[in-house]
Amino acid sequence: MPKKKRLVPRNLLSSSKRLRTLSLRKISLFLKQPRSKSAKAKKFRGQRVKVSAWVHRLHIKGKDMMFVELRDGSGFLQCVLTNKLCHTIDALTLTLESTVTIYGVITKLPEGKTAPGNHELVADYWEVIAKAPSGDEAFTNKVTKDSDPSLRLDMRHLVIRNRETSSVLKVRSKLLKSFRKFYEEHEFYEVNPPCLVQTQVEGGSTLFNLDYYGENASLTQSSQLYLETCLPSLGNVFCIAESYRAEKSNTRRHLSQYTHLEGELPFINFDDLLAHLEDLICVTIDNLLADPEAAALVMELNPEFEKPSRPFMRMDYVDALAYLKENNITKEDGSLYEFGDDIPEAPERAMTDKIGRPIMLINFPVEIKSFYMKKAAHDRRVTESVDILLPGVGEIVGGSMRIDDLDELMAGFKREGIDPTPYYWYKDMRKYGSCPHGGYGLGVERILAWLCKRYTVRDCCLYPRFVGRCAP
C-alpha cells in the first residue's frame, strides 16, 4: 500500500525525511508563529497562526471544501480546508472530537456568512493529533440531548463538552470569581476549614459517618462553626468549600455534595446581616454581568434574566403562614400550616414564584432551627434567622445571628439532645471574649440554577452527587 502524502507549507518543503523528525513544537518555533486561542483570534486577523483544538462540528461541502468548527475551551473557531487539504486519508476519515492542529490565516468572513466571532481560519496545513472513533463508538452514538437522564449522568464526562453544559460551568467559574471580588472589596479573609469533622451542625441524621483511624468522624455539613473561631483573629471571614448532607431527598434542588459559600461577621446585629446579604447577592451579580463574556453566556442560557432589584422583600415567618392560608397553599392532607411547622420546598416555591421577586423570610421558630441560632429579643419563640428565596429555585441562603452567650448555647445543646463535650473549642468562643456575630451559607449550585435557568441543580456542578449517584 503506497504511503499517503503529507501536505506541508511551501516554506517547509526541504525534505520529507527532515520534516518527519520535527515535532509540532519545533515546526511552530521554526515558523515563529503565535499560538492563538480561539476566543482571542480577532486580534490575529490577517496573520498566520497555529491552533490546536477539538473538532466540535464538521461539514463537508463537495470534494474540495470542508468546514471544521474547533473548540478549545476558550471559544469556537471555524476553519476552512480546501482543495488538496480535503483529499488526505485524515480528511476523509475525520471524526467529531478528534484533536487537530491547523495552520492558516485568520480572515474576516465575507458578507452574508456567519461563524463564531465573524471570522474563520483559512487553512494551508493541518494534521490530526488524535483521532476519535467512528461507527458504533462515534461520539454522536454515545450520548445525545434526548438520552435518558441516567445515561447522560453516566456519560457526564462527554456531556460537559456540549456548548450548553460547558457554558453553565463557565458561568459558575465567573460567579465564584465575582463572589471573591466582593469579599476582597469588603475586606474579608478566605479560610479553608476541614471537611473531616467530629461535630454536627445541621442535625445528626444527615451526617456521612466514617472510620477515621479508629475514631468516629464524618464529612462536614457546614464550615460555619470553624469560621466562627476565626473571628477574633481575622475578623470578617468566608470560605468556598464542599459540604455533605446524607439527606434521602431526591428533589431537583438537593445534592449530597454541594459547593457551600459561607461567611461570618463579628460585631453586627440582625439588620446588618440582612443588609450584608442583600449587598452580597446584588453586587456579585453586578460584578458578574460587568464581565462581557459572563454576561453573554448568562443571556444565552437565560434570555429573560433580570438582575434582582433592591430592597428585597422582607417577610416574617408568621406572615408567610398567613400568605399560604390566603392563597390556599396547604399541606398534602389539605390542612393549613401552623406556627412551628417547617415550610417545605413545594409551598415555599409556590409562594416565591407567585410573588416573583427575592424574599427574605425571617424570624423562624426556635424549635425548627439549629441549636446555635440566637433568639429574637422581641419574641423569644423565634430566632433571628433568615432564608433568602428566589423565584424558580426557592431557598438559596440560610443565615442567622449566632448565640453569643454560653448559658444560652448550652441550653441549645440540651434542647437538641447534643452532647456538648466534643464542642469544647466552640464553647470557648463564648468563654474567651464573646461578641455579637452572625453568618450564613449560600448554595452555589442553587444560585447558578437561578442565573442560568436550569431545572435542576444537578446541571450546575461538574459531577453531581445525590441519592444513588456516585459515578463517574
Image: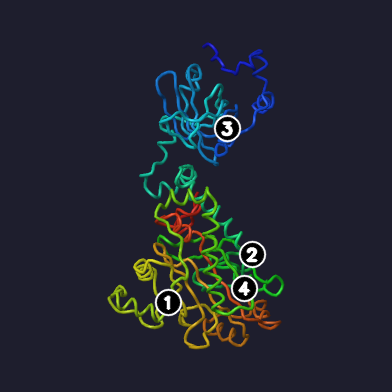
Numbered badge on residue 265: 4
Q: In this view, does 159 lie to the left or right of 409?
A: left
Quadrant housing residue 47: top right
Q: In which quarter of the image is residue 145?
A: top left
Identified by mark 4, the residue type is Leu
**Place of residue 173 in the rendered image (x, y in percent of width and height, measured from the top left):** 55, 52
The residue mark sitting in front, 1 or 2, is 1
| Mark 3 in CB contact with mark 1 (< 8 angstroms) | no
Residue marked by disc 1: 315
Under mark 1, the amino acid is: Met
- Number of residues whose C-alpha sits closer than 10 Å to that of mark 4, classed few (under 14), some (14–19) or many (20 or more): many
Residues at marks 1 and 4, CA–CA distance in whole angstroms: 23 Å
Under mark 2, the amino acid is Pro
Q: Which residue is drawn at 41% across and 36% down?
A: 140
Secondary structure category for the residue under label 4: strand
What is the x, y in percent for residue 438? 58, 76
Q: Tag 2 or tag 1, which sits nearer the N-term?
A: 2
Q: Are marks 3 and 4 in contact (CB under 8 Å)?
A: no
Give the camera-side residue of 142 and 349.
Answer: 349
How crowded pointer 3 is (Cα within 10 Å; few <14, some 14-19, many 20+) is rated as many
The Cα atoms of the two marked residues, 4 and 2, are separated by 20 Å
Q: Which of marks 3 and 1 is in front?
A: 1
Disc 2 element:
loop
Q: Distance between the residues labelled 1 and 2?
A: 35 Å
Q: Where is residue 392 in the image (x, y as percent from the top left)?
A: 39, 62
According to the image, label 2 marks what residue?
194
Q: Mark 3 points at which residue?
A: 52
Quick one: label 3 or label 2, which is nearer the N terminus?
3
- Outermost residue, top side: 2
SS at badge 1: strand
